[in-house]
Image (spheres, rainbow, N blue to C red):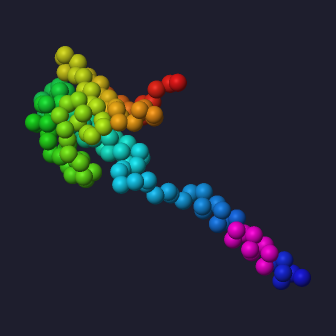
């Protein structure tokens, strides 16, 4: 009797663990394009590269800089990010395919605001925001 009870408990535990691990299984991306998570990760990587470039610009030249200046002074940070993510930069405002960049530097060069907005996904609007603090925020509209 105890043997059958132990077997039943073991079978139930295996079934419960199987159900539990299925809950955390990852689904394969649908189609040949990047998933939304991959696209967002690439966008955040670019925001990090811009923040790094801005920090170096502030350290070396004493003020933050506009996009074109960052590209000419600190291309190594942005190029490294693009190589790691397998993408190429476009021209402003759509610097990444489907992403618009807005980078505003205060006139005195002591602050900046940066928004990278997903313009390709109209159903689920999304953006990544940062500023001179170096913090990056997920930005989504309030419905």
Q: Which residues are magenta?
A: 7-15
Instruction: Assign the magenta stretch its main secondary structure.
Output: helix
Tell me if I can see residue 58 in this picture.
no
As for residue 83 lying within the magenta part, the answer is no
Left or right, residue 37 beside residue 130: right
Please give the name of the residue rendered at 29% of the width and 28% of the height, measured from the top-left corner: 114
Q: Relative to 78, is 3 above or below?
A: below
Residue 20 locus on image (x, y percent): 64, 60
As for residue 10 lying within the magenta part, the answer is yes
Tell me if I can see residue 67 in this picture.
yes
Q: Relative to 70, is 38 above or below?
A: below
Please give the name of the residue rendered at 54% of the width and 59% of the height, measured from the top-left corner: 25
Please give the name of the residue rendered at 21% of the width and 33% of the height, measured from the top-left corner: 54
Q: Relative to 84, is 120 above or below?
A: above
**In the figure, residue 74 lies in which quadrant?**
top left
Please give the name of the residue rendered at 78% of the width and 73% of the height, measured from the top-left corner: 9
User: Which quadrant does the N terminus fall into?
Assistant: bottom right
Q: Residue furthest right?
A: 1
């Amino acid at each position: 009797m105890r043997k059958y009870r132990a077997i039943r408990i073991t079978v139930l535990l295996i079934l419960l663990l199987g159900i539990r691990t299925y809950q955390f299984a990852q689904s394969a991306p649908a189609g040949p394009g990047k998933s939304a998570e991959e696209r967002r990760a690439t966008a955040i990587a670019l925001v990090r590269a811009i923040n790094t470039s801005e920090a170096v610009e502030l350290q070396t030249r004493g003020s933050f800089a506009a996009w074109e200046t960052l590209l000419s002074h600190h291309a190594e940070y942005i190029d490294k990010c693009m190589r790691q993510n397998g993408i190429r930069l476009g021209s402003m405002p759509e610097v990444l395919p489907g992403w618009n960049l807005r980078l505003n530097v205060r006139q005195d060069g002591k602050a900046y605001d940066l928004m990278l907005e997903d313009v390709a996904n109209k159903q689920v609007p999304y953006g990544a925001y940062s500023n001179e603090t170096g913090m990056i925020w997920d930005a989504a509209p309030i419905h």
